[in-house]
C-alpha cells in the first residue's frame, strides 16, 4: 500500500498572530512552525499502516524551502520519502492541483490530508484532491481500517458518527480521533539522524493560477474588560445575560 | 444569473443555519440585483425559506441518504441550471464536506469562514476569519463562479418575506461506491455545531463524576455540552466534545465555561461565540481576559445555584 | 564564525522540548514533593535515544554530538531539572568513560544496554570525607587473585537507587596517592553492595541520590577500566565532560525560570498595566536575558570545542561556573517577579530556585571551578583560544 500524507507547515498553536507589509503578510518573526495538527494525526495513523502492514509513506508539502524542516520532522517520525513542490502556496485549488500532479505521477492507494489547517482554516484541500482525481473521499475521519483494497472508515458528523465502507483509492480528511493525542510521536534521535539521509525531492510546480487571493489581514477589535459578578449574586448575571447580552 | 444557497435540512426540517444562510444569500442577491435560489434535498418545509428572501426553491427528493459526492453533484447541477454566479453554503460538517467537491466541478473559487456579506462584488471581496478566529483576511475571488462558506452565527437571520416558487428538481446522480454501513446519531441531544448555547467544562471540575453539573446546567439552558482539551485527553469526556483549535470550533450565541482555564488554543476555538461567560475559582485564569462576564468562585457552589436561579427565571419569563 | 544551529540540532532541540512539555510537565510538582523518580519518563527517554545520545551507534547509542546533548539537556531541564541530571550523570559520567576507555567486553556487557536506555548508570566518586578533593579516596580496592575486594562508602550518588551499573572510584595503592586509584564497573546486584536511604534534598528532589556502601565486594579484574592506577586521571577527565552536562542543566533551569517570568509579567498587571511594563520588572528581565545568553554562549562553546576534539576543560569550567551562578541568581529573581505566586509550588519557579542551588555544588563547586580557571590564567591562558 502506498500512502501520501499532505503536510501543512503552520505556526505553532501558541503563536502570536501579527501581520506586516501593510497588513498583507503574516509576520513570521519568532514563530515556531509545526506539522499541522490534523495532518499529524493522519501521519501517525499512516505510521501504523507502515509498521503493521508494510505500507510506504510519502509526505508532501507545497511551499518554499522554509517548510523543509517540517517535512524532515515527518521523515524523522518515520515517513519514507518527502516531496516539496517549490512554489508559494496561494490557495487551496492551486495546492490541490500541485498535489494531484504528484498523485497522478506516483499512484497512491490512500491520500491523507488534515481536515483543515490551523492557519487559514480552509478545509478544502482533501475534498479538492478527491474531486480532481475522482477518488472517494471521507472528511472528518476519526477511524480508518484497511483490508486489502477496501476501507472501513468513520466520519464525525454534527452530533454523531457515520461508518462507511469504500474501495481504495481513498482520500480522507484526518482529525483527532484517527489516533489519540497520546499516540503522537516525538521523533527519536535515530529518526532525526536517518531523516537527514532520506530523500527529500524538490519538484517544480505546475504554475496553476490561484482562484482566491488574500489581499489584506486585520486583527479583531480589542475586547472590553470582563464584567465580574459576585458568586452570591447570580441573579445579576442572569439579568445581564437577559437584558444586556440578550442571549437568554 | 442568480445566487444559490444549499439549504440543509435534517429529517425533513430545515436547519436553523439554512435560514441564516438564506438571509446571507439574500444580501448577496441584493448586491448583485438578482434572484436568490435555494436547493434543498428531502425537505418537507420548503415554504419556510420564503420568510428569508428566497425567490425560487429547487427541491430534490433523492438520494435518501447524505453522500457528499452525490450532494455535490446536485449543487453543481442546480448552479448550472440556474446560472448561479455565487453559491453559498453553511459551515456544517456536511456542507464543508460537499462544498470543495462542488467547487472543483464548477471551477469556482471557494472561501470558507466568511463572516459578513461581501465587501464588494466587483471585485468580489469577502471577509473571512483565519488563524482560528485570531484574525480576519480579506479575500478576492477571481473566478466567474464563486463559492462562499458562511461562518455560523456570523450573519444572523433576517426576515424578508417572499413567495417563492417551488420546483421539483431531478439532478443526475451517479452511483457511489462508498456505502454507509451505519449511522450513530443521538436523537434528542443538542449538538455543538447547532447549539445556540454551549456549556463547557474543564479540569476545574476535578473528574468525570462531576459532569452532572455541566449536563444539568446545559439541559436547563437547552445547551450542548463541551469540554476542554485536557478533559478529553484524560478520557473524562469523548473527543467529540473537545472544543478548541485542534477540536471543534464553537460559534454559539452564549458560551459558558466552567473550570476552564482558557489556554490560547481553547480561546481561539471558541472566539467566534458572541457572549462568553467564565466561572473559575482562579481569578488569574486567562479566560477572564477573553470573557464578557465572569464569576470568580467555586464551580461546585456556583453551578447548582445558577441552575436553581435559571429555573426560577424561566418560570417567571414563560 | 557561525552562530547557527544545523537543521538536525534544531530537530533535536524541538524533540526534547516536545518531550519535556508533553511527558515531563505533568506531575513535575508532585514528583518533586513526593521525591518520586520519573522512571516511566526515563524509560521513554531511553526509547527516544536521549539515554545514549552521544554513544556510538555501534554500541546502541544515537551517536550525536555534544552540542545535541547540551540542547536536549537544556530543554529537558527547563521543565524538569531532575530528569536533566538523571540524563546528564548517565551520559557524561558513565557512558562516556566506558566508551572511551572500556574494553570490548565491558562495552558489550555494560555500555550497550545502558546506551539503549535499558539500564541506568551512576558514577561513584564522592565520599563522606572526599568531595572536592577527590584524591583522598578512602574506599579501598585490594587485589586478591582474579578479583579486587572493594570496601568503603560513597556519598551523594545521583541515580544511586536506580542504577544497575556503577562506575566506582577506589584506592588500590594508598602509598601511590592519586596514582594508586582505580575505576571499576560494579553491578548493583553483587553481594556486599548496599544502597543507603534516598536523600531528602533541597532541590532536584525526584532524582534519586543515595549513599552506597561496599563490604567485601568481589570485583572481577576485567571490570577495571584502563591500566592499574588510571582511576584518578579518568575521574578528572569524566568531570571535565560532566561539567558540560551540568552547565547545560543549569542553563535550562535559568532559561525555564526566565521564560516563566517573562510570560507571567505580561499576564499579571499592577497599577493598571502589565508588570512587564514597570521598569523594576523590565530591568530584571533584561538582566536575565543578557546573563542567560552569555551563559548559553559559554555552554555551547564548550560543547563545540569537545566536538572539535580540542581541549575543553578550561571552557567547560567557565561554562559551568557561569551557568550555575546565572541559574541561582535568576531563579531567585524569577520568584521575585512572580511575587506571592512565586512562593507557591503551582508556579514552578520556587522549584527551579531550589533546583538551581545544586548546580553550584555538584560536579565541582563554583570555588573549585574558580581554582581551575585561575590555574589556567596563571599558565598564561588569559582567554579561551579561538
Image: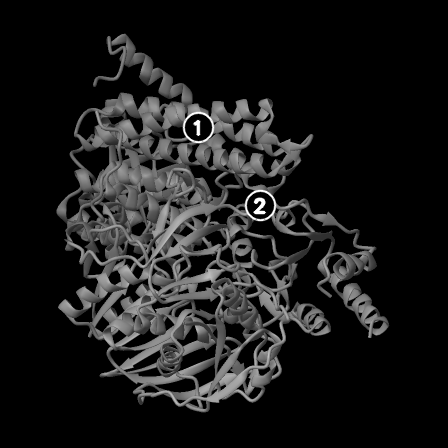
Name the residue nearer the viewer: C54 or C213.
Answer: C54
Residue B128 % position (x, y): 47, 56
Residue B280 % position (x, y): 68, 54
Quadrant of residue C132 within the rendered picture: top left
Which circle marks residue A221 in the picture? 2
Instruction: Establish if B254 lies above or below B287.
Output: below
Residue A172 % position (x, y): 33, 72
The residue indicated by pointer 1 is C361
Chain where mark 1 sits: C
Quadrant of residue A149 within the rendered picture: bottom left
Q: Residue at x 32, y 39 (%)?
A: C71
The quarter of the image holding the C terminus of chain B is bottom right
Name the residue nearer the viewer: A214 or C158.
Answer: A214
Q: Marks 2 and 1, how far apart in space? A: 52 Å
Q: Residue at x 48, y 46 (%)?
A: A218
The quarter of the image holding the N terminus of chain B is bottom left
Amino acid at each position: 500500500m502506498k500512502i501520501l500524507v499532505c503536510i501543512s507547515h503552520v505556526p505553532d498553536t501558541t503563536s502570536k498572530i501579527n501581520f506586516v507589509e501593510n497588513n498583507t503578510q503574516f509576520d513570521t518573526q519568532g514563530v515556531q512552525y509545526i506539522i499541522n495538527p490534523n495532518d499529524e494525526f493522519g501521519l501517525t495513523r499512516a505510521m501504523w499502516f507502515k509498521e503493521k502492514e508494510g505500507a510506504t509513506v510519502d509526505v508532501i508539502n507545497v511551499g518554499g524551502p522554509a517548510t523543509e524542516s517540517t517535512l524532515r520532522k515527518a521523515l524523522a517520525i518515520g515517513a519514507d520519502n518527502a516531496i516539496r513542490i517549490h512554489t508559494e502556496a496561494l490557495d487551496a485549488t492551486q495546492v490541490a492541483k500541485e498535489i494531484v500532479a504528484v498523485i497522478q505521477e506516483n499512484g497512491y492507494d490512500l491520500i491523507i490530508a488534515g481536515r483543515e489547517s490551523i492557519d487559514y482554516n480552509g478545509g478544502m484541500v482533501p475534498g479538492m484532491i478527491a474531486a480532481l482525481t475522482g477518488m472517494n473521499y471521507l472528511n472528518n475521519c476519526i477511524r480508518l481500517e484497511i483490508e486489502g483494497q477496501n476501507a472501513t472508515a468513520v466520519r464525525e458528523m454534527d452530533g454523531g458518527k457515520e461508518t462507511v465502507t469504500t474501495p481504495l483509492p481513498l482520500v480522507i480528511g484526518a482529525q483527532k480521533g484517527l489516533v489519540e493525542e497520546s499516540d503522537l510521536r516525538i521523533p527519536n534521535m535515530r529518526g532525526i539522524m536517518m531523516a537527514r539521509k532520506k530523500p527529500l525531492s524538490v519538484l517544480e510546480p505546475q504554475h496553476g493560477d490561484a482562484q482566491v487571493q488574500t489581499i489584506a489581514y486585520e486583527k479583531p477589535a480589542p475586547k472590553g474588560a470582563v464584567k465580574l459578578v459576585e458568586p452570591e449574586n447570580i441573579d445579576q448575571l442572569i439579568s445581564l445575560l437577559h437584558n444586556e447580552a440578550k442571549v437568554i | 444569473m442568480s445566487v444559490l444557497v444549499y439549504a440543509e435540512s435534517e429529517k425533513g426540517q430545515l436547519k436553523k443555519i439554512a435560514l441564516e444562510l438564506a438571509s446571507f444569500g439574500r444580501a448577496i442577491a441584493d448586491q448583485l440585483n438578482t434572484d436568490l435560489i435555494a436547493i434543498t434535498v428531502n425537505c418537507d418545509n420548503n415554504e419556510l425559506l420564503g420568510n428569508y428572501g428566497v425567490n425560487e426553491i429547487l427541491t430534490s427528493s433523492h438520494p435518501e441518504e447524505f453522500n457528499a459526492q452525490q450532494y455535490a453533484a446536485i449543487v453543481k447541477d442546480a448552479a448550472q441550471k440556474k446560472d448561479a454566479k455565487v453559491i453559498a453554503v453553511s459551515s456544517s460538517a456536511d456542507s464543508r464536506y460537499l462544498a470543495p467537491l462542488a467547487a472543483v466541478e464548477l471551477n469556482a473559487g471557494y472561501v470558507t469562514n466568511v463572516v459578513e456579506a461581501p465587501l464588494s462584488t466587483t471585485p468580489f471581496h469577502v471577509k473571512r476569519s483565519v488563524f482560528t478566529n485570531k484574525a480576519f483576511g480579506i479575500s478576492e475571488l477571481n473566478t466567474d463562479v464563486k463559492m462562499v462558506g458562511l461562518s455560523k452565527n456570523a450573519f444572523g437571520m433576517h426576515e424578508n418575506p417572499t413567495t417563492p416558487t417551488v420546483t421539483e428538481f431531478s439532478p443526475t446522480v451517479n452511483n457511489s461506491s462508498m456505502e454507509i454501513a451505519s449511522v450513530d446519531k443521538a436523537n434528542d441531544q443538542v449538538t455543538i455545531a447547532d447549539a445556540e448555547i454551549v456549556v463547557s467544562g474543564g479540569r476545574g471540575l476535578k473528574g468525570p463524576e462531576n459532569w452532572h453539573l455541566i449536563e444539568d446546567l446545559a439541559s436547563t439552558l437547552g445547551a450542548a455540552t463541551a469540554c476542554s482539551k485536557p478533559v478529553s485527553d484524560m478520557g473524562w469526556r469523548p473527543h467529540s466534545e473537545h472544543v478548541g483549535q485542534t477540536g471543534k470550533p464553537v460559534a454559539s450565541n452564549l458560551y459558558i465555561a466552567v473550570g476552564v482555564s482558557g489556554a490560547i488554543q481553547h480561546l481561539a476555538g471558541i472566539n467566534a461565540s458572541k457572549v462568553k461567560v467564565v466561572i473559575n475559582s482562579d481569578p488569574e485564569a486567562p479566560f477572564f481576559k477573553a470573557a464578557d462576564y465572569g464569576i470568580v468562585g467555586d464551580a461546585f457552589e456556583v453551578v447548582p445555584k445558577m441552575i436553581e436561579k435559571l429555573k426560577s427565571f424561566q418560570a417567571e419569563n414563560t | 564564525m557561525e552562530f547557527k544551529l544545523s537543521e538536525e540540532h534544531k530537530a533535536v532541540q524541538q524533540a526534547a522540548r516536545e518531550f519535556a512539555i508533553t511527558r515531563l510537565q505533568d506531575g513535575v510538582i508532585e514528583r518533586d514533593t513526593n521525591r518520586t523518580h520519573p522512571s516511566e519518563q526515563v524509560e521513554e527517554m531511553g526509547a527516544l535515544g536521549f539515554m545514549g545520545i552521544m554513544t556510538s551507534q555501534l554500541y546502541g547509542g544515537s551517536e550525536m554530538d555534544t552540542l545535541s546533548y547540551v540542547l536536549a539537556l537544556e530543554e529537558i531541564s527547563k521543565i524538569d531539572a531532575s530528569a536533566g541530571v538523571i540524563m546528564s550523570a548517565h551520559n557524561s559520567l558513565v557512558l562516556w568513560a566506558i566508551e572511551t576507555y572500556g574494553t570490548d567486553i565491558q562495552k558489550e556487557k555494560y555500555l550497550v544496554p545502558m546506551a539503549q536506555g535499558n539500564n541506568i548508570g551512576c558514577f561513584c566518586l564522592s565520599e563522606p570525607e572526599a568531595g572536592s578533593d577527590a584524591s583522598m579516596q578512602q574506599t579501598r580496592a585490594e587485589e586478591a587473585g582474579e578479583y579486587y575486594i572493594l570496601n568503603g562508602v560513597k556519598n551523594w550518588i545521583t541515580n544511586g537507587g536506580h542504577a544497575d551499573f556503577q562506575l566506582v572510584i577506589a584506592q588500590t595503592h594508598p602509598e601511590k596517592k592519586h596514582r594508586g586509584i582505580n575505576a571499576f564497573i560494579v553491578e548493583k546486584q553483587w553481594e556486599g553492595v548496599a544502597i543507603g536511604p534516598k536523600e531528602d534534598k533541597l532541590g532536584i528532589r525526584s532524582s534519586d541520590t543515595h549513599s552506597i556502601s561496599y563490604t567485601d565486594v568481589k570485583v572481577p579484574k576485567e571490570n577495571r577500566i584502563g591500566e592499574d592506577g588510571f582511576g584518578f586521571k579518568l575521574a578528572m577527565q569524566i568531570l571535565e565532560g560532566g561539567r558540560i552536562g551540568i552547565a547545560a542543566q543549569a542553563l535550562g533551569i535559568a532559561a525555564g525560570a526566565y521564560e516563566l517570568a517573562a510570560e507571567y509579567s505580561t499576564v499579571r498587571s499592577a497599577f493598571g498595566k502589565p508588570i512587564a511594563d514597570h521598569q523594576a520588572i523590565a530591568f530584571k528581565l533584561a538582566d536575565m536575558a543578557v546573563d542567560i545568553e552569555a551563559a548559553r554562549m559559554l555552554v555551547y562553546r564548550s560543547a563545540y570545542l569537545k566536538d572539535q576534539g580540542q581541549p575543553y576543560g578550561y571552557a567547560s569550567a567557565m561554562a559551568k561556573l557561569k551557568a550555575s551562578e546565572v541559574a541561582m541568581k535568576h531563579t531567585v529573581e524569577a520568584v521575585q517577579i512572580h511575587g506571592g505566586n512565586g512562593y507557591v509550588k503551582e508556579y514552578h519557579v520556587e522549584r527551579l530556585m531550589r533546583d538551581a542551588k545544586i548546580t553550584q555544588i555538584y560536579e565541582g563547586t563554583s570555588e573549585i571551578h574558580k581554582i581551575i580557571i585561575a590555574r589556567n590564567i596563571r599558565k598564561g591562558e588569559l582567554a579561551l583560544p579561538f
